Amino acid sequence: MSSLNDRQQNRPVTYSHYTKNKRESSDAKSAQSRVSSGESKANDRAKRKSVQHSTFASYFANHVWALVSTLGSLYRTPLSTMMTTTVIGIALALPAGLFVLLQNVQHLSSSWDNGTQISLFLKHDVKSAQTSELLSQLESYSLISDIRYISAAQAFEEFREKSGFNDALTLLEENPLPSVLVISLANQYPSEAEVNVLMEYLSNLESVDTAQLDMQWLARLNGMIQIAQRGLFIVALLLGLAILVIVGNTIRLTIQNRCQEIEVSKLIGATDSFIQRPFLYGGIWYGLIGGVIAWGLIFVSLHMLKEPVKNLSVLYSSDFTLIGLGVYESITIILIGIFLGWLGSWVSVRRHLREIEPK
């Protein structure tokens, strides 16, 4: 009986241990399942990253191959490459050279643009007292900020120093130059109405022979510069279209020469983007080399003109020097060449590649 009671008392204890072990085993299995599920997800993510990295590496390698192989094909045909790139370089150099020329003209005119000035040439019989009275009268005028008096003797001496006609001037019996009043206006850029009123007032003064607005010629020069800028834009546009035609025609001939190769590539499943890639890089190479040639032509031209321009400026007592192409302008010329080369090849490839289909 005692043994039976003990078994009856121990039975519930044995069952509780059994259920406890069962639960612990189930928890371990679920934890192991979660760990294995997490590991599989991590492996899937790693595989996707590996596939993406491999795809990007393959895409990059294809572009590098197309870039290098296109340069090699251009190297194998040096004569046609040189002719095409030289024409592109000249077409780019012409508007760029005109742009540099206009920059230098604007720089030169800006050194002269020191405000609006009026020169009053006095009559030869004007006495010193009349000149002093005229100065006092003009100083009270609100539009005038400064008046500089140049006597006839000072004007003659200045003309002798700067003109280079010293020997000829010594033969003159009397000074032909009049005294001058150089008037600077308070407003550096006055309105046309204000200038006209002042010019009419000064011209009617008794002691004044001639009143001359010194900025009129500079205004005309700036007007001509604006016209030249518009003309430069038109020339650049036309030459840009010419570059597109040149590159497009060159790429068209290349496509025709490789027509069978393109048909075979399409038969084995090559996409249009894969086929057109080398031709696009060919246009980029044409534009890049043409841009470098254009930069070289402008650099050499400016170097040849630098010394004569310097000697001429010295004769006019000026320190003017030619402005060349800066870093920004140089990079811009090359980038424009690259863009035009790519655009011309893209238009040609898109048009002619659709006409080639495997038979």
Image (cartoon, rainbow, N blue to C red):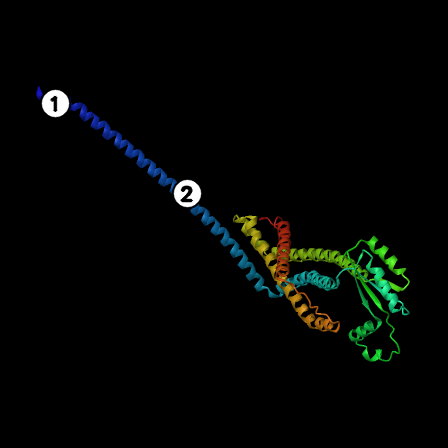
Q: Closest to the observer: 331 or 161?
A: 161
Q: Percent from the top left, x then y, of residue 98?
A: 71, 62
Q: Percent from the top left, x then y, of residue 341?
A: 63, 56
> What's the residue at 66%, 61% (across, down)?
88
The image's mark for residue 6 is 1
Q: Closest to the observer: 120 or 313?
A: 120
- The residues tagged by marks 2 and 1 sit, at their Cα atoms, a distance apart of 59 Å
Q: Circles 2 and 1: CB distance less than 8 Å?
A: no
- Which numbered disc, 2 or 1, marks the residue that appears first in the sequence? 1
**Secondary structure under the numbered disc 2 in the rendered image:** helix
Q: Closest to the observer: 38 or 100?
A: 100
According to the image, label 2 marks what residue? 45
> What's the residue at 17%, 23% (across, down)?
11
> What's the residue at 53%, 54% (across, down)?
63
Left or right: residue 243 versus residue 206 is left
* Amino acid marked by disc 2: Arg
* Amino acid marked by disc 1: Asp
